Amino acid sequence: MRRTRRALAAIAVPATALALVLAGCSGQTSTAGGSSAGGSAGGSATDTLTLGMTADINGWDPSAQPPYQAWGIEAVYDQLVQCDTSGGIIPEAAESWEISPDNTSFTAHLRPGQKFSDGTPVDAAAVQASFEPLIKSASDRYGGVTFASPDANTITITWPEPQPLLNNRVCSPQIASAKYLASGDLNTAPVGSGPYVFNAANSTSGSIYSFDKNPSYWGADQYPYQHLELRVLADETASLNALKTGQIDGTLITPALYDQAKSAGMSTLQTSVGIIQFQLTDRAGEKIPALGNLKVRQAMNMVLDEQAISDQLFQGHAKPVHQIFGETSQAYIKDLGDPYPYDVDKAKQLMQESGFGDGFTLTVPTMEGQPWLPILPYVTQQLGLLNIKVEQKALTGPDAINQLISGDYPAPLWGLGGSSDSIQDISIQVLDTGFWNVSHQPDATIDALWQKIVTGNQDEKVAAQQEINKYVTENAWFVPIVAPFGFYAYSNAVSVPQMSDPNGGHPLLRDFQKN
């Protein structure tokens, strides 16, 4: 008999806070509000900005940093250029630039006189040293890159092939001191040229991270606070209580705490956390033979009730999704519908037909603060109906991200994609070189369609993206579940007139202004 949505109400849901490793984009909604509890614990409200973090900092290595809740990284490191919310680029360490007509090279002209916190110059050598680790660790985006520097303040970065996502490639890396990068100790104290300098004496790893304003930073006037304090508060109830009592100025909250935040007079921003989805990357069945069977992948789609997850586990602050691409993206297909409607009996039948009716074990890597954690008990229960046993593997520490995408876990459950830039989502999730396609198994059909994106005209690019969407959907490469709405709550001690994060995940440091 088909399971009803009422079964979902019996699942116990742990309290978790929002986080995202690689996010999508969405619009924001600002709601005015105030609280008498506003202020900063690290100093006076006019001197110190204190933010809560729902997950700890993953070390200081600039080449291995997720963009979400990366306020510490944003504080200490500058970037070559910055991506804006429209997909364009704006100045950072580089004050001007040129892009080659074939989108293979980027020439940056650095601001003269910049220095890192160790006194060494922000020059072409430092930019090259910051990009070079990515040639190996992020070869899907930086493989084969070469550098040319006619003078200390000019550097040309060249890719072996045209880059449809060149803007993203140049705005993502952080720039650090070449001396620091050569030291081999990248997790003790960062050396950058950003708007703040790390204060190790006033910091406690895993708890509080303190920073002092860098008066020589080229854009210092964008940051009105003399001090920055980041407090790790993994428990979302504790984080909201800290906000209510003025111990912090802002924090990410889950939909479960939205009403509490509003009733306490907090202001809120709606943020994006991507699409919660399984990445079924082992489609050749190399590590998990069952995942090589299309009917197994289809069954995993059909056993989950996306609408009930949205309504009950996210209190309606989410929407069910049936494809991995955002509704405003070029790959999105409006009339696609739900190719795998919720039907437990049909899912069980598919498992029997596949020859894997006895099931298998699926290890799901977890990290604290992820937006999909509330659904994990339900997912575990439902997959159990197909004799698929879910085992959790907690990842922590500076190497957690590398472990996550290592390929050891060929079907991660995560929140990502769903952005307005489907070429970016294809690059990281669908191509065999993409870091989220963790098994990196090649596919000739995808390769051919990608070449049309790289070399085709605009109509051909759009058509190829939609063909990719159809192909991965028909072959059940993913189990898209829901797109939850995230929220950022803040007190009246600060104002956030805009949210300039291109991923829409949360306000950036420069978005926080004195109220």
Image (cartoon, rainbow, N blue to C red):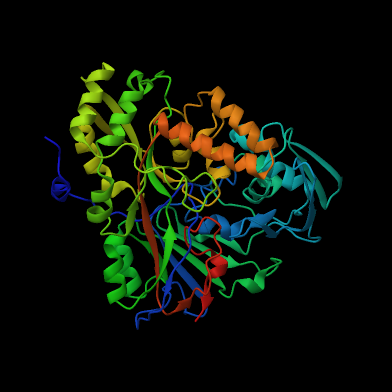
Q: Which residue corresponds to the image point at 75% horizontal and 40% vertical from the top-left? A: 104
As displayed, is residue 455 above or below residue 15?
A: above
Q: Which residue corresponds to the image point at 22% horizontal and 43% vertical from the top-left? A: 378
Along the line of sight, which residue is nearer the eye, 461 or 268?
461
For residue 498, side relative to residue 92 (left or right): left
Along the line of sight, which residue is nearer the eye, 492 or 182?
492
State the residue lying farthest toward the right: 150
As displayed, is residue 440 above or below residue 43?
A: above
Q: Which residue corresponds to the image point at 15% horizontal and 51% vertical from the top-left? A: 9
Is residue 200 visible from the viewing direction of this image?
A: yes
State the residue lying farthest toward the bottom: 36
User: Residue 115, percent across and down?
Assistant: 73, 58
User: Residue 276, percent across and down?
Assistant: 37, 45
Screen quadrant of the N terminus: top left
Along the line of sight, which residue is nearer the eye, 92 or 166?
166
> Which quarter of the picture shows residue 235?
bottom left
Is residue 359 visible from the viewing direction of this image?
A: no
Along the line of sight, which residue is nearer the eye, 412 or 94?
412
For residue 129, side relative to residue 503 (left or right): right
User: Residue 461, percent across and down?
Assistant: 62, 41
State the residue lying farthest toward the front: 335
How many numbered discs, if any? 0
User: Residue 108, percent across and down?
Assistant: 78, 51
